[in-house]
Image (cartoon, coloured by chain):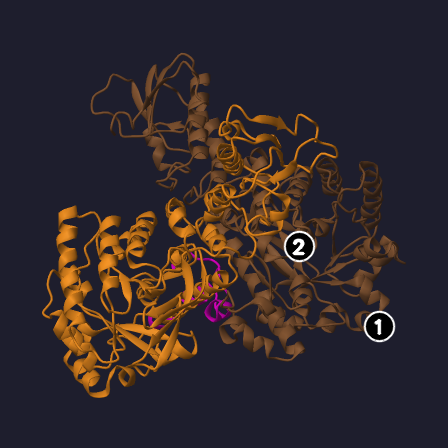
Chain colours: A orange, B brown
Amino acid sequence: MREHFEIRDHDVAGRIGELEVPRADVTVETPALLPVVNPNVLTIEPSRLQSEFGAEILITNSYIIRSTDDVRERALDEGLHEMLDFDGAIMTDSGSFQLAEYGEIDVTTSEIIEFQHAIGSDIGTPVDIPTPPDVDYEQAERELETTQQALADAEAIDTGEMLVNAPVQGSTYPDLRERAGEQAAATDLDVFPVGAVVPMLNSYRYADMVDVVMGAKRGLGADCPVHLFGAGHPMMMALAVAAGCDLFDSAAYALMARDGRYLTVAGTEHLEELDYFPCSCPVCAEYTPAEVRAEDSDEQERLLAEHNLHVTFEELRRVKQALRSGSLLELVERRARGHPAMLDGYRALLDHADQLEAQDAVSKGTFFYTSHESARRPEVQRHHDRLDRLPVPDSLLVTESKPPSEHDYDAVWRVTPPFGPYPRALGETYPLTAEVPDRTDVAAETAAAAGVARLVAEHPESDVTLAHDDWADAALAELPATLDVENLADLGE
Amino acid sequence: MREHFEIRDHDVAGRIGELEVPRADVTVETPALLPVVNPNVLTIEPSRLQSEFGAEILITNSYIIRSTDDVRERALDEGLHEMLDFDGAIMTDSGSFQLAEYGEIDVTTSEIIEFQHAIGSDIGTPVDIPTPPDVDYEQAERELETTQQALADAEAIDTGEMLVNAPVQGSTYPDLRERAGEQAAATDLDVFPVGAVVPMLNSYRYADMVDVVMGAKRGLGADCPVHLFGAGHPMMMALAVAAGCDLFDSAAYALMARDGRYLTVAGTEHLEELDYFPCSCPVCAEYTPAEVRAEDSDEQERLLAEHNLHVTFEELRRVKQALRSGSLLELVERRARGHPAMLDGYRALLDHADQLEAQDAVSKGTFFYTSHESARRPEVQRHHDRLDRLPVPDSLLVTESKPPSEHDYDAVWRVTPPFGPYPRALGETYPLTAEVPDRTDVAAETAAAAGVARLVAEHPESDVTLAHDDWADAALAELPATLDVENLADLGE
């Protein structure tokens, strides 16, 4: 376990955790959203972020503070908490974003960490290199070395009670992300931002985001708190939590509002194009889109920012509730239909079913089969793995229907697509208590057939018969040619 | 057009309409939700339903009013609008539900219609027979005749400005629902409730609900306002609107609240089991589940009822917004992942793609391919139908990639799963501007292959070559054996 992070509950690779932030003397429940506060423009006052939206932690930029004379003096004088009027936890960024954006900044890791400490930050950040996607491998590797040096520099400083971020870079190379994760986890730093994902998210490359996070997680291991740096759109939060992210930050709520944009769990809308508000937050319950458009631009921006933040915290609560009740993947299924790129993200996540399976809870609420993708969930694979360990009688009927009233088999098992065969007694255990549609599909049947094939392969000494309910040819093609197969539909059942 | 209903906008078989209710002197925008108001128990005052939730119309039960002495006298004396303090439109039910529940009631259609008129109802209802699902065909047919007689009785009464419902029954027999729809549309009655769906919805038989509605719609035609009687759970509203329903009513918001139940767009939760509220309505933004549990039971019930109503009206606005922007089927896709039974409902809806296609808008926003089911959308079929009318050159390359820099074909068309081939110029028109995932699937490829096969079948004189990007065998099996096929993946593209 990391010293300041404890995991309380888990589902898929997501978890409910507690991040202890000693300098603020608060414990932040994760997954958490850190609203980004621009010290020069307080769209919503930090005290309201806490009281009305439930923010336990926020993030602000120490580089901007340091570069703005009067703000710097106030911050050094009063400390961040008093200056922002916020008594939750405060994380500070270092200027790495400005480095990536403008090519250079005038501060070293040691200097900025010292400054962050001096202004009373609770979680500081070194100056890492946010290598963008798709650079060549050598550049990504070279810049990763610079980031590692920044981590080492940060580690060498006595920061007292202030926690310190250890960013994980590596561009779009999962193996570099994994290596960076291993190196970061080997330091005694505290929080692990997966960096430079913003350009991927801005171009809806959710599949790449998943591959990068899963790479970083392989390196970091399960016990590190992971921050998906720069990410806080409600549409991708369930997916990112399922992949193992614990912290998010949102500048979007305010930046988008300035631009007349309205966030939803399925994407971003323009205020101009809305006839109805698809939301019931306090703003959307009180105003119609036409009424907001009739306000002056400052008020419009404030109302949109409040809605954007409400819908984001709402999704965070929804993700936590799903996680608690063991239905996080069901929520990801729903979110995957918000945009084809989200479907890519979910399909990419399922490509990592092995890695997810290792951390997923063994028993949950009820498995819902709600798409062809459901057939690729880690639970299906786990059930198939379990088949290898089950004792199988010499002669076995595996059937989708009830056991025949008279038969000569040693045992009769069930098969319910997408799951492979199982003894009836297991039917009361997760995931075999699944709810499945009446109108099943070829993906479910194919997964079930693969389970049957695996049982036969692992138990060549047993004589197995399969009775299926009119499975598709593509599913039947999974079965060994030697298997005895009956179609229940032909029997009029 | 029916006299009191005008359609303003449409998407799939859903529409934004205006129901003119002359006796209330209001025009109700549809799809609309009618909160059910029990005249004996006002969980939320009708005036608040209007001012805080935006209800333009409500429904109450004239049979209960008639059976309760003091309420009857007040209703006759003051009229419903004053008694309930509501100046929107008021629909009244007739006691058919009580008839179904208790086997008999002590009132005829003529009596109850006269009574509804006397208490100032704006939309009255005859005493029809809500035949339950799965009864034998003869019973369903016999009871339908009784319902037809009730419609005739209602039609014979002079109800002045009061509109009158013409319920459509027929149990789970789509052909009876269609016949009932034809007969109802042939009356001069005004609003068309599809009745007795509640037992189906209570047992999550959304596929049956869809088949029943589609049957009724075939009989009613496009211009009748359709009320899905007794239905108002937010999880099924998008599906029901896409099938062509215009009015919903909700007793659930109050009944569920009494029972500690909390509605969401993906189902029903128990307050007891919630750690977080997955919502940001004014109730959920102010309270945590633990705080609501700490209230006394009346206050708990009130808070839950308010949340339930907020989330229901929120979903109604979301459905309307989706409809306006031509993305209703995208919303149905999302809702189909709330429960396997909702997936059944969506799959059932797609079984009616022909019927939907006849009413669907030809051009919309952007088609999102977000599941295997997307390959069965009416737009895919319409594109394939259009192929028959396109002039095809003698030699044609259909490719998933760019046109080759040098070639001898007369023309080079594109193919983008799930759509079949199209000339490049059409690529800027709906639905070919679709967003599709990078990680495509066999359903999309199979639909595209079917489009290629259709083009070849309709134009046997043309010499067609297909260049695909590594399609699955099941997709390639759709292609005619004579077609010249290249796999771009083999060419290293």
Give the structural element (helix, strand or loop) at label 1: helix
Callout 2: few (<14), some (14-19), or many (20+) C-alpha neighbours within 10 Å?
many
Q: Does mark 1 fall on the same chain as mark 2?
A: yes
Specify the segment rendered in magenta.
A271-299
Above or below: residue A74 compared with residue A365: below
Above or below: residue B42 compared with residue A76: above
Tell me which residue sits at (29%, 67%) in the image.
A191
Which residue is the extreme one toward the bottom? A77
Is residue B485 or residue B452 the one in the foreground?
Answer: B485
Callout 1: few (<14), some (14-19), or many (20+) C-alpha neighbours within 10 Å?
some
Foreground: disc 2 or disc 1: 2
- Identify the residue under disc 1: B73
Q: Where is residue A223 in the image (x, y as percent from the top left)?
A: 35, 63
Q: Position of residue B330 (x, y in %)?
A: 48, 47
Please give the label number shown on residue A347: none
Give the structural element (helix, strand or loop) at label 2: loop
Q: Quadrant of the N terminus of chain A?
A: bottom left
The chain carrying label 1 is B
User: Which residue type does callout 1 highlight?
Assistant: Glu
- Identify the residue under disc 2: B231
Give the number of marks.
2
Q: Quadrant of the C terminus of chain A?
A: top right
> Is A295 inside the magenta-drawn segment?
yes
Q: Where is residue A67 in the image (x, y as percent from the top left)?
A: 14, 75
The chain carrying label 2 is B
> Is A235 inside the magenta-drawn segment?
no
Above or below: residue B333 compared with residue B408: below
User: Which residue type does callout 2 highlight?
Assistant: Ala
Task: For residue A304, say whether it is visible.
Answer: no
Tell me which residue sits at (49%, 48%) in the image.
A379
First along the sequence among labels 2 and 1 = 1
